[in-house]
Image (spheres, helix red, strand yellow):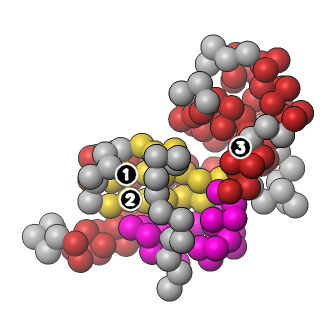
Amino acid sequence: MSVLKVPVSSNDHIQGDEHALVTLVEYGDYECPHCGRAYYIVKALQKHYGPQLRFVFRNFPLTQIHPLAEPAAEAAEFAGTHKRFWEMHDGIYENQDRLSVRILSEMAERLGLTAERLRDALADHEFEPRIGKDFQGGVRSGVNGTPTFFINDVRHDGLYEFKDLVSAIDARMLQLKPDVA
């Protein structure tokens, strides 16, 4: 059983209440088709659990097989410096089938960000250290592919289909609060 080695902190990209019963951490790759599928499953989980679930996304670009994963992660981090991380994150996954640097620039402009500044950040690999830190934390935590989920700091080694994640999250909730059905 692998555990999350880098605790969730204010440096993470977080959706949901910090006092939620369950924290779901995903190590993801923006070009990975499995992560693209998981994106919609996470959205359904957030709707299903509401305030009981907090979601954290960490970058784990598999650059050897996904050449656009790193630029996409850098674009999301760039948007994050302007408080627009989640809008870029969602836009990337929702446009994953046509992902390109041009699409990333267009998304930045739609978010009111400067496409030229994004292109400069990509050329300078400005956000590579941040992404590398996420990646190394994932490696230390036993991540070896994407998507990898942790439920309250314990790696979920089962399938990541909606019903499988619901079962795992419900089981964790029961451990924490026996009166939750």
Q: Mark 1 packing: few (<14 Cα in 10 Å), some, or many (20+)?
A: many
Residue at 67% across / 17% down in the picture? 113
Q: Position of residue 61 (x, y in %)?
A: 74, 55
Give the vertical position of 134 relative to 167 (above or below).
above
Quadrant of res 177: bottom left
Q: Which residue is mark 2?
A: 23
Camera sees residue 60: no
Q: Are marks 1 and 3 in contact (CB under 8 Å)?
A: no
Left or right, residue 26 beside residue 105: left
Which residue position is annotated with label 3? Answer: 73
- Residue 69: x and y in percent read 77, 48
Residue where numbered disc 1 is placed: 54
2 or 3: tag closer to the N-terminus: 2
Residues under numbered marks 2 and 1 in contact, where contact means CB atoms less than 8 Å apart? yes
Q: Amino acid at mark 2?
A: Thr
**Type of residue at label 1?**
Arg
Q: Secondary structure at mark 1?
A: strand
Q: Earlier in the sequence, mark 2 or mark 1?
A: 2
Q: Magenta span covers which residues?
A: 134-162
Q: Is residue 115 above or below residue 56?
A: above
